[in-house]
Amino acid sequence: MTSTSPSVPARASAPPIEVNDASVVLGSNLILDAVDLTVYGGESVALLGANGSGKSTLVKTILGLLPVRSGTVRLFGHDARERRTVPWGRVGYVPQRVGASSGVPATALEVVRSGLLSPGRPFADRGRSARRRALEALDAVGLADRARDHVQVFSGGQSQRVLIARALVRSPELLLLDEPLAGIDRASRESLAVTLAELRRRGLTLLTVLHEMGELSDVIERAVVLAEGRVVFDGPKSELAHDHARHDELGHDRPDDCEHEHEHGATEPAAHHAPVLTTSVRQAGGVK
């Protein structure tokens, strides 16, 4: 990667994400129940939980895509419900991968440039400036040399990095990623980890939805775990790694079970499994 990659603007005084006592109801179902979450500038936070725990719903709520029944959600100090007041240029979002290469006859450069478009400015930033910014974003994810290649030929991991570049093209301060490891092989996951580590080094704030930390463990400093729409753990990942009361909450084996399997020829070592939770809501520095 070269020095032409987009730089991160100075951090704002208000936390990038503030969720206070937020509840979300879809139909007759309570999906999020009194969730509190603050993500501070420069943090790298993993949002963990089993399928159906509310992770993706929380991200969509943070982005103002789903309404809260009660509580508040703020981005850089702005109410997410007041979409016109939110500085969306400071927020990047990478949804669950639907495939940058799903039959779209577009180059990586064209996909990334599309991130500069908006409903109010459908023809904005189509000239040399847009090209330069798109190339810088591709460089930031290590794909500048593939700018003219069609995304149809890209691997799952490369497609994921193209989507990250698309989110980076506006030089956001906050990046939300929904299950970026899903459906890609180990080599691609390791490459993605290098990309996110570099973004974190530059000061980007990261909130990453994951089923387990896996190859991104070194990029994560704090873990937040959801279960049935509630926060059941919020603290340093090192504390989570030693909490063995509820491995079933994430759908993974206990460490002692993994070690037992490894002794009998299992190929997946215990270190690759996600840690467990306590039954109480835990935060750094104590129990809530």
Image (cartoon, rainbow, N blue to C red):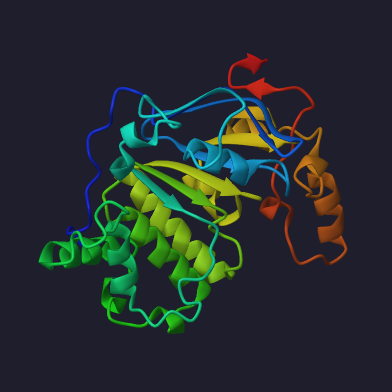
Q: Is residue 131 left or right of residue 189?
A: left
Residue sitting at x 31%, y 78%: 146
Q: Residue 173: in sight, yes or no?
A: no
Q: Depth check: 124 or 271 in front?
A: 124
Q: In which quadrant of the rendered view does residue 277 lie?
A: top right
Residue 179 pos. (x, y %): 57, 54
- Of the 4 image quadrants, the one containing the C terminus is top right
Residue sitting at x 44%, y 32%: 80
The answer to whether residue 130 is above or below residue 54 is below
Residue sitting at x 32%, y 59%: 115
Residue 182 pos. (x, y %): 60, 62
Residue sitting at x 50%, y 47%: 218
Q: Residue 184: in sight, yes or no?
A: yes
The answer to whether residue 261 is above or below residue 149 is above
Residue 66 pos. (x, y %): 55, 39
Q: Is residue 93 left or right of residue 147?
A: right
